[in-house]
Image (cartoon, rainbow, N blue to C red):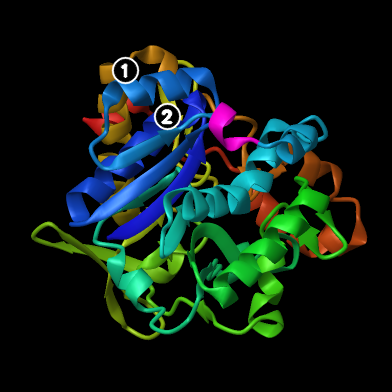
Amino acid sequence: MYNYCTLFDSAYLTRGLAMYESLSVHCKEFHLYIVAFDDLAFETLVKLDLEHATIISLEMFEDETLKRIKQERTKGEYCWTCTPFVIRYAIERFGLEHCTYLDADVYFFSDPSVLVNEMQNASVLITEHRYTPMYDQSATSGIYCVQFVTFKNDERGIKVLSWWQNACSEWCFARYEDGKFGDQMYLDHWTSMFDGVHVLRHLGGGVAPWNIQQYTLGQEGSKLYGIEKKTHTKFDVIFYHFHALRFLSHNQIELSVYRLSQNDRTYLYKPYVRHLENLSDKLGEKFIFLQEPVSVEGYTLSYMISRLKDDWLLPFKFFYRKLFSRQRIFDKKSFIA
């Protein structure tokens, strides 16, 4: 049995459900533990009676420490803070041998057990951003991405998880500060601080809009594959991280703030958006997600533009100008037809 956990509120409900259903298609034996971050999400998920999921309310999950921290942070910052706590809760409450945290906006195109199995005797699995050079934000967002993180319930795994919990309790904010950014840049130090931390090698785990430019996608039957342009290495796409996809007003959709090819739109975005649309039709229009201001790993556009006068950001002016061009806005209905 492969155990996964995640957290999301009603604004991300269709994405979380799409992730769950993509797991159901590709994973033979799995269970997903979902912490519902508001009452609407909890009530809706309970009514859906998902076969391979356990739904956890905030009332069940939050302790007094988290309730105190919640008052000091924004909604997004609190969700980031809770990531290691959700993993620890699932492991301890349900007696799991291992658990993998998933971002709600990842979507599976193949069985992720191959990624977990790559750990072998390691106790912790982390995934790199693998940024395309023109989009490299490692210095301010981290080398690794909190999108797919596995912990075993052993001495080494719990040691790292406990350290991460304590660090996020003390500081977890949506800004870069003293080598920290949210819950994410803490991962940069794990391979040197702890034993038993494995960095995923499989290129199909962690395909995302900030690295998709390095790959050519194709399909053989129902199997989605990628070819790394630099090495010509062929691999199965296990999951894609649909970061920064936004439903806009006037029936429009912005797929990404990063450069996408026609293949990317065809093989990744069309089936995903269609899936979200189907879930929205099933659940009701209130679950269509109108995202917060466009961001790159947590930085809002207005914040980044305000910082352009800073010397350390001057080399990135061209990057920002290209990144935030609005050429990738589509009419939603025509796009998913």
Q: What residue do we see at 69% from left, 38% from top? A: 78
Q: Quadrant of the N terminus?
A: bottom left
The answer to which quarter of the image holds residue 205 is bottom left
Task: Between residue 202 and residue 220, name the one nearer to us.
Answer: 202
Q: Residue 294 placed where, x, y %?
A: 62, 37
Secondary element at image label 1: helix
Query: In this image, 180 relative to 152: left or right?
Result: right
Residue 310 vertical position relative to residue 74 in the rendered view, above or below: below
Specify whether residue 233 is in view. yes
Instruction: Find out whether residue 130 is within the magenta segment.
Output: no
Q: Residue 28 placed where, x, y %?
A: 18, 57
Which range is magenta? 58-62
Q: What residue do we see at 59% from left, 42% from top? A: 325
Give the residue pinned by disc 1: 283
Instruction: Find out whether residue 61 is within the magenta segment.
Output: yes
Kind of residue at badge 1: Leu
The answer to which quarter of the image holds residue 112 is bottom left
Which mark, by number, is residue 239? none
